Amino acid sequence: MDNRLFIFDTTLRDGEQVPGCQLNTVEKIQVAKALEALGVDVIEAGFPVSSPGDFNSVIEISKAVTWPTVCALTRAVQKDIDVAVEALRFAKRKRIHTGIGTSDSHIKYKFGSNREEIIERAVAAVKYARRFAEDVEFYAEDAGRTDNEYLARVIEAVIKAGATVVNIPDTTGYCLPAEYGAKIKYLVDHVEGIDNAVISTHCHNDLGMATANTVAGILNGARQVEVTINGIGERAGNTALEEIAMIMKSHHEIDIRTNINTRKIYSTSRMVSSLMNMPVQPNKAIVGRNAFAHSSGIHQDGVLKNAHTYEIIDPREVGVDDNSIVLTARSGRAALKNRLSVLGVQLEQEKLDQVYEEFLKLADKKKDVNDDDILVLAGADRTQNHRIKLDYLQVTSGVGVRSVASLGLNISGEKFEACATGNGPVDAAIKALKKIVDRNMTLKEFTIQAISKGSDDMGKVHMQVEYDKQMYYGFGANTDIIAASVEAYIDCINKFKI
Ligand code: KIV
Ligand code: ZN
């Protein structure tokens, strides 16, 4: 069996479906180019029929990347396939990813159908897609809970119809690794013509087994894995790309290789986390802040004597270098530029100057400026074209008194001011804001998070505001968490479709 493992990245499709992770087209192109540089084989760029935004992103990503295959998702529906074909028209290499639910529960409750009819629909979709693309992948949604015998019949039929890749998703993240591995083996052993297609894994992490299941799939014959950066994705997420890449790289006995340039893993992880406002848990394998931090005395002693005692991966292999930590007020523009480029961000001179000014202000307030701070600063100019900006904010608060906030906004060049009291400083500031922007909006979710440690740290605020029956996501980052909260609220308002 071939020892090449294809990496199919679905950060921009399954990952981007996560509430709050939505990117605009420019940001998606940035991620797609980083994925190309990382060496992924396939980029799933979106689900074109689902929205004009997805349709447009597939077009622009197709134009922007050269080497990876660009893939578009569809249901087993002709209209979806037509729209995907249209969106993929600029792709140098294109793939249509079509499919249908095959578990009894999907057949009965989702489609009100029966097993034979589902096979017919699957075959018809693959045949139709093959009219427009040589590369057609079929997904058997909820394959994890689909009876193996029936699944094998579906897979055999779609391969006969022309599917070049067959995707076996554990959609609900239910399978045990041995069970998922056995499922792949069952297909290898029982599907006539299986050698004419690549078997793909697509594992969700609901029970924390996505990576283990994916590895079980590979060991039993799968040669494509569907993964996302940092494991982001629906609910508990998808299999993390960086974990599979490093498992294959570290376990030589498996003798399977990917095309991933692992030294770009860390910068890609940071970029995705920053653009999607999705923090990486500190103990996340490979890319978490503590992934290579040895804190116990015994471990530190061992690592100092010989890194192999406690380190199975040299951090440099994933692009984490020793000087990745601190920049201070004495660091120059060149150091900042170098740091940004390690993190995968290239800025023009003028933008770099602006970010540097902001960096100096932050470095004055904060002892160490770390990678996350820098990424926030580099992204800060994304707000420059916003219609509403925070001019100033003053808040007084304390124990036993009501908080008072006075706040100034600049709305399309015009200045507005308001004052309010509230139950705490954030409440007072948002009430003042609402006096100026008088709309029927409700705060639905509000999370504050320190980026690293230390009382001088930057606070990141994620917000969800409901307006006109729609949810809007906003983000703010500031060493002052009240200001970060107001910025996040303003970020939401700037996104309102008015
Ligand atoms: O989880 C899943 O089943 C999917 C399919 C649409 C491929 O994401
Ligand atoms: Zn999925």
Image (spheres, rainbow, N blue to C red):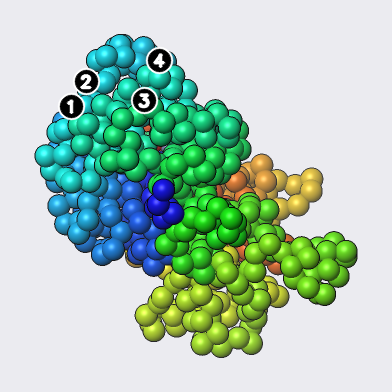
Give the CA distance from mark 2 to mark 1: 6 Å
> Which quadrant of the structure image shows residue 34?
bottom left
Quarter in which the C terminus is drawn = top left
Amino acid type, residue under disc 2 in the picture: Glu
Q: Position of residue 180 (x, y in %)?
A: 52, 32
Alpha-carbon span between mark 4 and mark 2? 16 Å
User: Disc 4 marks which residue?
Assistant: 104
Instruction: Name the residue tied to disc 2.
Output: 120
Determine whether 194 is above or below 53 in the image: above
- Crowding at dot 1, Cα within 10 Å, few <14 / some 14-19 / many 20+, comes out as some
Which quarter holds ligand 1? top left
SS label for mark 4: helix
Q: How far apart are the alpha carbons under marks 3 and 2?
A: 14 Å
Identify which amino acid the numbered label 1 is placed on.
Ala
The amino acid on which the numbered mark 3 sits, given as a three-letter code, is Ala
Question: Are the residues at dot 2 and dot 1 in contact (C-beta closer than 8 Å)?
Answer: yes
Residue on which disc 3 sits: 152
The residue that disc 1 covers is 124
- Which circle, 1 or 3, is nearer the viewer? 3
Residue 435, percent from left and from top: 47, 46
Alpha-carbon distance for marks 3 and 4?
Answer: 14 Å
